[in-house]
Image: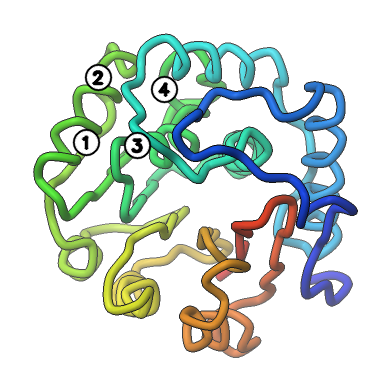
Amino acid sequence: MNEKIRDHRSSDWQSYTMVYAEPHQELEPVRREVLVVEQALRSLRQAGILPHIIYDREKMLAHRQAVRELFEIPWTAITPRLQRLLYAINAIHQPANLLAAGIFCGNTFISNAGAAIGPGSCYRANRLVGVEIKPEEAERAARNVARIDTLGEAQILAADAVQVARDWEGPIDLLYLDADGQGKRVYLDILEAAYPKLSPGALILAHNSINAAERLSEYLAFVRDESKCQASVNIMIDGEGLEVSCR
């Protein structure tokens, strides 16, 4: 790993906010959004978590437009900046096997998997799995994802993500955590179940690293332990936060 970077903060992360019920609201010029995300990617590259910061911005916008037109999203805490960041990380890392836990209506899942399926696709994945414990939301997520995933490459499960991670066969190259349970303690439960399956250099992305930091204290202590993860950076580009860790 390279320089020890513990967090990255945009100058306006505290004032950059969205209305959860307006998932597609433009909060700033795209040019500004691109710059903020690029700076975050540079920090991840500097920490040795990403090999470079290059991704196709036009494909990202095509992905965003498809989600805008085809997804039913009752509410979301995924800001436009975070949507771009998640897409970019996946487009750069290109995980062959993705497990996303706590996907609600599927917006968090497609923000990751959209680099491999749909109009934003820039590589082919092997396995893309999204898990949502609430059956009705898992059904909605499956409907949403199917409108973009015309080849049927993704799999949406109505299940307990801890059990899915425990039963997973083969490697996991990117684990995304956004589940809500036991006061967010479930993040660590899922990670511990998935940890033996994580491939060398696998990425672990945990949403709510800022606004749920206290509840995630045990999880954050785990990923920031250098005996467990090579590097971990708290990306602060909005009030929610994203902890990006490298196995």
| Residue, disc 4 | 117
Q: Nearer the viewer, mark 3 or mark 2?
A: 2
Judged from the image, the secondary structure of the residue bearing numbered disc 3 is loop
Relative to 61, 125 lies left or right = left
Q: Amino acid at mark 1?
A: Gln
Residue 126 disc label: 3
Q: Secondary structure at mark 1?
A: strand
Identity of the amino acid at label 3?
Answer: Asn
Q: Mark 4 Cα within 10 Å, few/some/many (few <14, many 20+)?
A: many
The residues tagged by marks 1 and 3 sit, at their Cα atoms, a distance apart of: 11 Å
Q: Disc 4 and disc 1: Cα gap in Å?
A: 12 Å
What amino acid is at disc 4? Answer: Ile
The one nearer the camera, 134 or 222, is: 134
Report which residue position mark 2 lands on. Answer: 146
Q: CA distance from mark 2 to mark 1?
A: 9 Å
Marked residue nearer the N-terminal end (4 or 2) = 4
Query: Which quadrant of the figure has residue 53?
Result: top right
Residue 137 lies, with reference to residue 8, above or below; the image says above
Image color mode = rainbow
Q: Measuring 71% from the left and 29% from the top, which residue is drawn there?
A: 27
Q: Earlier in the sequence, mark 2 or mark 1?
A: 2
Does residue 78 lie above or below 100 as drawn?
above
Nearer the camera: disc 2 or disc 1: 2
Looking at the image, tell me whether mark 4 or mark 3 is earlier in sequence order: 4
